[in-house]
Each structure stands twice: as C-alpha cells, then as structure tokens.
Image (cartoon, rainbow, N blue to C red):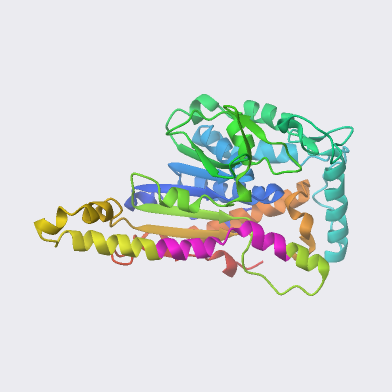
Amino acid sequence: MDASSHAVPKQLHRADARFEQTVLLLQGGGALGSYQAGVYQALAEANLHPGWVAGISIGAVNSALIAGNPPDQRVERLREFWETVCTSPLGVPYFSSIPIPDDGARSLLNQARALSILLFGAPSFFTPRFPPPMPWDVRRADAVSFYDVAPLKATLERLVDFDRLNGGDMRLSVGAVNVRSGNFAYFDTTTHRITPAHIIASGSLPPGFPATEIDGEYYWDGGLVSNTPLLWVLDGRPRRDTLAFQIDLWSARGELPHNLADADVRAKEIRFSSRTRAETDRYKYIQKLRTAFATLLERLPEELRRLPETALLAAEANDKVCNIVHLIYRAKTYEGSAKDYEFSRRTMEEHWLAGYRDAAQSIAHREIFEPPDRLDGVRTFDFSSKVPP
C-alpha cells in the first residue's frame, strides 16, 4: 500500500492528552472493514492510541485485533487478517500492477469476485455448508445458516491474545442481539471475560452466519438493532472528557437512485448507517441539558437539593465535553450492493488506503484536539468528505 503521499503528521505527540480518554468506534460492514484498519494505522503512526475500542460486526473483529495485541504489533495483525481473508478462494493470484480500463470493467470484476465468495466463502473466515440448508430443514440454532464460521474462530485464536485483551490495558466493547428477546447486549471487558464467541456473536448476521451461543443464550449480529456503538460509549460510566473517532462504513447521505441496482445499494446504506449523525445530534442536545443542570445544581438552595427529583436529575448531570471526529467511507459507484462481501485483495487495499488517507487528513486539523467550551459540550468534525480522490 502506497501511503507516502498521505503520511500522518509526525509532529503529533499525544495531542489528545487534553481529554480524559480517546475512544475508537467501529461500525459493521463486512469487507468494507479494511477501511477501519487503514484508519487505525494512521492513528497509530500519529501516536494516537485509544484507551477504549468498541465495535459491531466486522468492527468487533478489528477491535479484538487491536485490543488483543501490543501497540507495535496491531497494524501487522490487522494486515495479516485482511490479507488472509481476501485471498482468492480459487487460488487466483493478486496482481496489483494490472490496470482496470474503466468503472464498467471494474464493476464486472467485483461482481465476479463477490460471486466466488458466495459460492466458496472467504479463507480463514467462513466456508459454505454442503449441502446448503433448505428453508424447512430443522437444525440446531448454531447451524441455521448458509456458512460455517469455524474458520473465523481459529483465526481469532491465532491472531488475538485474549489474555491481553482481557488484561485491562485497553477497554473493549462489542455489541450483539439476543435472538430470543430481540434485545441489544454489549459485552465489555469491564463486566465480561471476552472470548472468540463474543466477537463472532457480534458479527453473526443471519441467514449467512449462524447464531452464536454464549452462556445458554443465542446472539446475532448487533447491526440488526444498531450498527454503531456510539451511544454505548458516550453514555458509559464514569463519564469522561472524550475524544472519539467514529468510523462509519456506510454513508447515511447519498444520491437519489435511478435504477433498481442503485436502489438496492441505497437501501442497504440507509439500513446499516444507523443514523449516526442523528444519534450524534441527539447526544449533543442531551449533553447540553446535562451541563445546564450541573450548572444549575450548584446554585440551588439546600431545601431543593434534598428533593428526590433533584437527586434523580443530579445522577445524570455532568459537565464533561466530547469531540467526535467522523470518518465515513464513501463507496465508489462500481462497488455496488455486494461491496460488503466482495473480499478481494485489490478492493481491500483500496479501502485500507482510503481509511489511512481520511484519517491522516483529519488529524492534520489541530482543532479536533481542542476541547469544546463546557457550555457547548460537544463538537463534531467531518473532514473526510473534503479529501480529494
């Protein structure tokens, strides 16, 4: 990957120290997840190491690779994972120097590669079940799927040190959905001992992947309810001044579709973007209310402070601040609806470089390291849409 023209600013040394914590938030998106790996490489090169990483689906896998390795090995482990799963299941070699004449040719190439993934799976990630299940087949809950994810378990065990992951150096959170109750659940290293099953559960998207059993309950992909861990982290306790890097693999904003193929892509983008901007705006408003009451609480007379209603509000009041830096992958038109399962090496390298480029460009803006005014509470940034192609 040639990232030399988008190198991160080398003069940046712990500029995030003005915040009490730096967090990395990773959305789900399958094959698009190598964008997140590129973002992390840029952050690591800038000496920006999160103290808390939270992910959904493929974001959970990347989170485990980050939290489960020492700082000097994280990018190496991310690259090993992505190069492995993006190896052709048919043994077709990767030639980076072969040019693709136009977007039409690239679209056909991507569709062909996506078809091979559907038929043969992705190495060290998932393999198809033979014979494939029929709709009326009765099977165990952890076998109701078109693919078997046993290879992913072996890959995680090889590339992730789960003792380190659970050791407390970095907080890790991954989200999944309880199949029986339909409720969202977060597995967090402050409350759970995280295993490969927790990571796999977060990405168990039906009907492709089976439900994952944890302590007698079965879980599906967290993206079925919310594809971003944004509010889980920002509402976490204890509350702290936070610098958050929110990495989205689906853009909520897009063009009006004019054919069925475009409509399919746009629907998927809206479904999995999880309305990150709307959630951010909601958090900004709520934090303003919390800050306002924290200020007011100091001025209340003693008789009002003793009221139970005051105690209820006081539990939510705080004057913590947060900067949220959005990095959103903008897909190329030729990627199409299969972009989340088109695990080709060429596309992976493009996604990785796009993430690296967007992160390098964003952290060059020093204002993201300036805490907002306490009365404002929250500031958001999105420079990735301004990055030249």
Q: Quadrant of residue 88?
A: top right
Which residue is located at x 87 percent, y 63 percent? 101
Residue 120: where, in percent of width, then height?
86, 39
Which residue is located at x 65 percent, y 63 percent? 270
Which residue is located at x 78 percent, y 47 percent? 344
Left or right: 311, with 181 as reference point: left
Q: Is residue 361 visible?
A: no
Q: Quadrant of residue 339?
A: bottom right
Would residue 282 be counted in the magenta stretch?
A: yes
Residue 35: where, in percent of width, then height?
64, 52
Overall secondary structure of the magenta section? helix
In this rendered view, identify the residue nearer to me: 267 or 28.
267
Q: Residue furthest top?
A: 163
Which residue is located at x 71 percent, y 65 percent? 266
Quadrant where the C terminus is found in the figure: bottom right
Residue 259: where, in percent of width, then height?
82, 72
Left or right: 4, with 25 as reference point: right
- Tally the marks: 0
Would residue 200 be counted in the magenta stretch?
A: no
Q: Which residues are magenta?
A: 266-284
Left or right: 108, with 313 as reference point: right
User: Up-down: is 69 above or below 370?
Assistant: above
Q: Is residue 18 visible?
A: yes
In this rendered view, identify the residue nearer to me: 286 or 178.
178
Left or right: 205, with 378 as reference point: right
Residue 274: where, in percent of width, then height?
58, 58
